[in-house]
Image: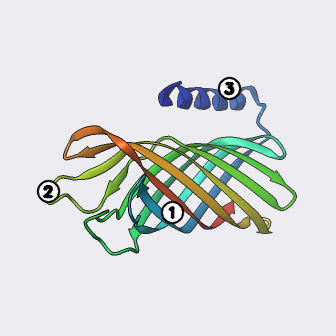
Amino acid sequence: MTKRRLFTLLITGLLWIVLCGQAQAWHLEAFGSAGYGTAEVQDEAKSPNMGIYQLGGTVGFNFVPMFYAGATASYQKIVQFSETNQAHGNRKGSRPDIAPTLGFSFLVFHLKYEYKMWGDYKLDKKTSAGAEVTYKSPSGHRLTLQYSLMPLVRIGVYYETIEFDKIDQGGVESNLTKPLDLTHYGLALAVTF
């Protein structure tokens, strides 16, 4: 199933629920997170250590009191803590993201799953020839476990891993023989409405 088809099915399903009056309530959430991880290519001698800062929001519908489905949009700023060298270069960059999302709540605990399939990873630095570098065709997951500090505020931890199968250098797109794997984990803070 293509990404466009999956997204169309998700939006159509959500609209049908709203129009038929089956949704119990909206789920609205704004969040921020800070994490630590790597941006590595398989068999790389040493992968750079990365810091990932993210701001975003989730919109969904509660089908039953404990479960919701929707979409998450976010923006990630990715910084590199390791020194730049010939082996891996500078992987500092950014990526906007839209992901289908499922959520589950039980008492004061909340679990949120996002399937990552949109959002290219554009590097800040250009090649020595002046070409922009963008990693494309993402596929991955994010899992966030949160605890309610008070009725509208949640704090938690997350784990995210995304593989990029294509690279665009100066407008020329090609498949990577070994995908770039961006993996990170950290703390998340959310406010629900």
Give the residue drawn at x 68%, y 26%. 16
Residue at the outermost left position: 129
Q: For numbered disc 3, what is the local secondary structure?
A: helix
Q: Are marks 2 and 3 in contact (CB under 8 Å)?
A: no
Residue sitting nearer the eye, 159 or 7 = 159
- The residue at which mark 2 appears reads as 130
Residue sitting nearer the eye, 176 or 72 = 176
Residue 112 in percent (x, y) is at 69, 51
- The residue at which mark 1 appears reads as 54
**For residue 189, which quarter of the picture?**
bottom right
Q: For numbered disc 2, what is the local secondary structure?
A: loop
Give the residue drawn at x 49%, y 26%. 2
Which mark sits nearer the N-terminus, 1 or 3? 3
- The residue at which mark 3 appears reads as 16
Left or right: 171, with 45 as reference point: left
Residue at the outermost right position: 107
Residue 192 in percent (x, y) is at 69, 59
**For residue 8, which quarter of the picture?**
top right
Quadrant of image for the C terminus: bottom right
Amino acid type indicated by mark 2: Gly
Q: For numbered disc 1, what is the local secondary structure?
A: strand
Label 1: few (<14), some (14–19) or many (≥20) C-alpha neighbours in 10 Å: some
Q: CA distance from mark 1 to mark 3?
A: 31 Å
